Amino acid sequence: MLAAFNSRIEDALGQLSVTNPFERSALETISEEEPARRALASACSGAPDEIRERLQREYFDAGPLVPLLSDSDVTEIIVNGPDSIWVERRGSLSMIEDRFLTALTYRNFVARLCREAQIIASLDCPFADGVWRGCRVHLIIPPASGEHAVVTLRRHPENPWTLDRLKEREWASASAIDALKALIRDHRNFLVIGGTGSGKTSVLNACLGEIESSARVVTIEDTSELKLPNRASTKLLTRRDPQGHLREIDQSELLKQALRMRPDRIVLGEIRGGEAKDLLMAFATGHKGCMGTMHADSARQALIRLEMLVQLGAPQWNLHAVRSLIWLSLNAVVVVGRTESGERKLDGIYRIASLEEIGFLIEKMA
């Protein structure tokens, strides 16, 4: 029945004088959707309420994604095309039965998403990142993505984790939670590391919740995911303009600005490039209690990767200088991961015990 009414709508739309009205509506004002809305209402005359509502969502909202966006168990939505929609629940990925009805309505959804998220993907730069309806969004369009645009949505948790809540959910033992709280209380500099989807940002948000109310925290991110701990704090966001109209602002530049903003603590959403050198320099020159996240599978791998990232920012430094900077500035590494069932867990908290000629010696604290 849904397909039959959709066919009627497509026939009605084909008689309109405008070309691709929905692609236009995603880029122009809502009032210009009215001819298409009237055509849909006429074609749906006599349709059951659930069919009419579904088609309204298809043509003027997010179609089959609407119920997924309101499902708190869904942590990630991956759309590979109009008929390939996948969701992650409790760490497990599965394909849903629903789909976008046509390639046109899927293209219209992608265009509407771009308008609402204020992002642009083009032939010159076919990918974009942003925030949309409480989710972090990544978009890549053809021809870089093949036949269809690919949309990846990661939900920002509405109720961020706290360390006490993590303990209740047995994410870590009581002694490990106490050790993590001690790192924050004693103003130690540490990194939260783990693989994709291991919960690094959620854990960092939980740590931010433990910071004293009088501390001024400056967070630095590509997309806004961290929750500020108090009103004295502020966040800085990078700027990337694939179209070349505006000067790009990277994390290294924001770190330099943050140092002039009287921060008690600096928090970097994710270390992924030469800004590692600037961050560790800030750590080593008196800024305590700072945090950040980084992709790595173990504490030892994290330190090796950190060496490489510092050398990107300071290629003239030798390895001993890089390791000395890490030793002077970083106190601990918090490793998070996922079990085979997809459940997030703390793998361990490691202290950098010493720097030897062969490299770092690390010691498990919890």
Image (cartoon, rainbow, N blue to C red):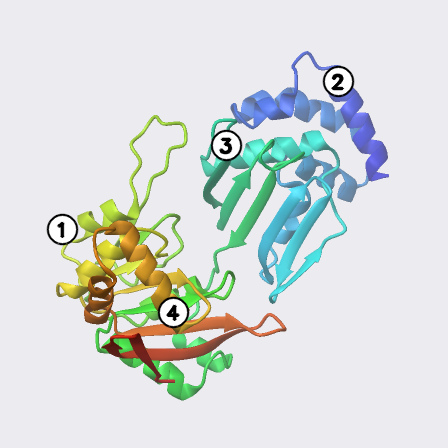
Residue 208 horizontal side relative to residue 281, left or right: right
**Residue type for callout 3:** Ala
Separation of marks 1 and 3 at Cα, in angstroms:
34 Å
Name the residue furthest top. 17
Q: Name the residue under label 3.
A: 121
Percent position of residue 18, x then y: 65, 14
**Amino acid type assigned to the residue bearing label 2 in the image:** Gly
User: Please, what secondary structure does the residue beneath circle 2 have?
Assistant: helix
Give the quadrant of residue 264: bottom left
* Viewer-nearest of discs 4 and 1: 1
Q: Residue 9: where, in percent of width, then height?
A: 77, 26
Closer to the eye: label 2 or 4: 4
Q: What element carries label 3?
A: loop
Q: Earlier in the sequence, mark 1 or mark 2?
A: 2
Give the alpha-carbon distance from disc 3 to disc 2, as whole Å.
27 Å
Give the Cα separation between the discs numbered 1 and 2.
59 Å
Q: Tell which circle, 3 or 2, labels the residue nearer the N-terminal end.
A: 2
Q: Is 71 or 78 nearer to us in this picture?
A: 78
Report the residue marked by disc 4. 206
Give residue 141's mark: none
Please report whichever mark, 4 or 1, sits nearer to the chain's N-terminal start: 4
Residue 14 is marked as: 2
Q: What residue is pinned by disc 1?
A: 260
**Helix, strand or loop status at disc 1:** loop
Q: Is residue 133 above or below residue 60?
A: below
Amino acid tagged 4: Ala
Q: In this view, does 112 lie to the left or right of 65?
A: left
- Farthest residue toward the bottom? 175
Residue shown at 22%/78% (left/top)? 186
Res. 213 in view: no
